[in-house]
Image (spheres, rainbow, N blue to C red):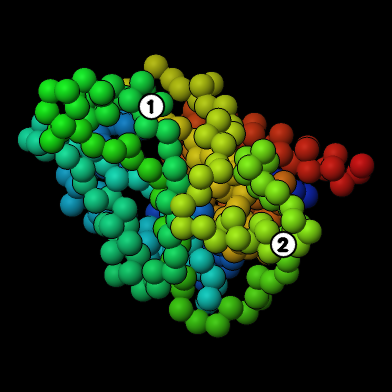
Amino acid sequence: MSQVLSDPMIDEESGFSAYHGDCVEVSSFLPDESVGFTVFSPPFASLYTYSNSDRDMGNCRSYDEFWEQFSYLIENLYRVTKPGRLCSVHCMNIPTTKQHEGYIGLRDFRGDIIRGFVDGGFVYHSEVCIWKDPVVQMQRTKSIGLLHKQVTKDSCRSRMGLPDYVCTFRKPGDNPEPVAGEFDHFCGDQSTFRNEGRLSIDIWQRYASPVWMDINPSNTLQFTTARDEKDERHICPLQLDVIHRCLQLWSNPGDVVLSPFMGIGSEGYESILLDRKFVGVELKESYFNVACKNLRAASEKSRESRLF
């Protein structure tokens, strides 16, 4: 355990701590009811998606084993979350393959996340669907179901593109520090937003939509330098607009924001810029190193904005 927690990157002035290690073990050391908000993308249960480490949840031998391991994290998240506060999970449903599952279809990963958090004591608080361009998905994945030629052959094998979801869960109890106040800026595709003279209400009407159509898919931290030769597939960082909105909606300045799967530091980057404290954990060394660079960059940007 000492190895997991050794030499964390801590910046007391900017208020962030980054740990290179196993998120279940690291989160077990966090104080009870110390986290104001948690936001992250979990690993998908697909062998060697992110690394070849035995500690990587994506490397479980089966889907059931993945959930057995993930349940330990949910237990820790419940313990460290303040009463009445929230945890947001960014996810999508997982395509199945003939090679692994014996059929082409979808696995209800989103639904399993909801059931897992509810079983862990959380209240299923809210959900938003994030639109994604099916043409871009088709070009990237070459999925048979998204190809137009499949419509001409047998459209029973055609399907829609896969959206992202942000599922949010609340720990029961009274929130000791309400998140209150009007919105003072809109985050998203600015070309689609109009201020009609009631800024906070106009922003809320967009954020309250059950489908977010105005997320810029390219507004992510650069991830290419985080890859190494042992990667079988790359990961896509969570869009900064999504993180920013969640922080606007469900956290206060000064809150501790947790990401148990920090990746290259996207959640921490936005947290620092919005004057939140941040605790992040990342198992993969190359991603952790890039995350540290991104957190330092956010800290410098935050200091400059305070000066000017």
Q: Indicate the position of residue 295 as horizontal and vertical percent values.
A: 66, 39
Q: Indicate the position of residue 234 as horizontal and vertical percent values.
A: 40, 26
Q: Indicate the position of residue 175 as horizontal and vertical percent values.
A: 58, 78
Q: Is residue 19 left or right of residue 47?
A: right
Q: Please, what is the three-letter code of the amino acid marked with disc 2?
A: Ser
Q: Which mark is residue 200?
A: 2
Q: 122 or 291: which is nearer to us?
A: 122
Q: Is residue 247 above or below residue 252?
A: above
Q: Residue at x 78, y 43 (%)?
A: 302
Q: 281 or 149: which is nearer to us?
A: 149
Q: Indicate the position of residue 218 as horizontal and vertical percent values.
A: 55, 30
Instruction: Rate crowding at label 2 as few (under 14), some (14 to 19) or many (20 or more) other CA atoms within 10 Å.
Output: some
Q: CA distance from mark 2 to mark 1?
A: 34 Å
| Mark 1 residue element | helix
Q: 133 or 307: which is nearer to us?
A: 133
Q: Residue at x 24, y 51 (%)?
A: 108
Q: Is residue 115 left or right of residue 297?
A: left
Most extreme residue toward the left is: 102
Instruction: Rate crowding at label 1 as few (under 14), some (14 to 19) or many (20 or more) other CA atoms within 10 Å.
Output: few
Q: Please, what is the three-letter code of the amino acid marked with disc 1?
A: Val
| Mark 2 residue element | helix
Q: Residue at x 23, y 37 (%)?
A: 159
Q: Quadrant of the C terminus?
A: top right
Q: Residue at x 67, y 38 (%)?
A: 191
Badge 2 vs badge 1, beta-carbon distance below 8 Å: no
Q: Which mark is residue 197?
A: none
Most extreme residue toward the top is: 229
Q: Is residue 5 left or right of residue 294?
A: left
Q: 219 or 20: which is nearer to us?
A: 219
Q: Which of pointers 2 and 1 lies earlier in the amino acid sequence?
A: 1
* Number of numbered tags placed on the structure image: 2
Q: Which mark is residue 135?
A: 1
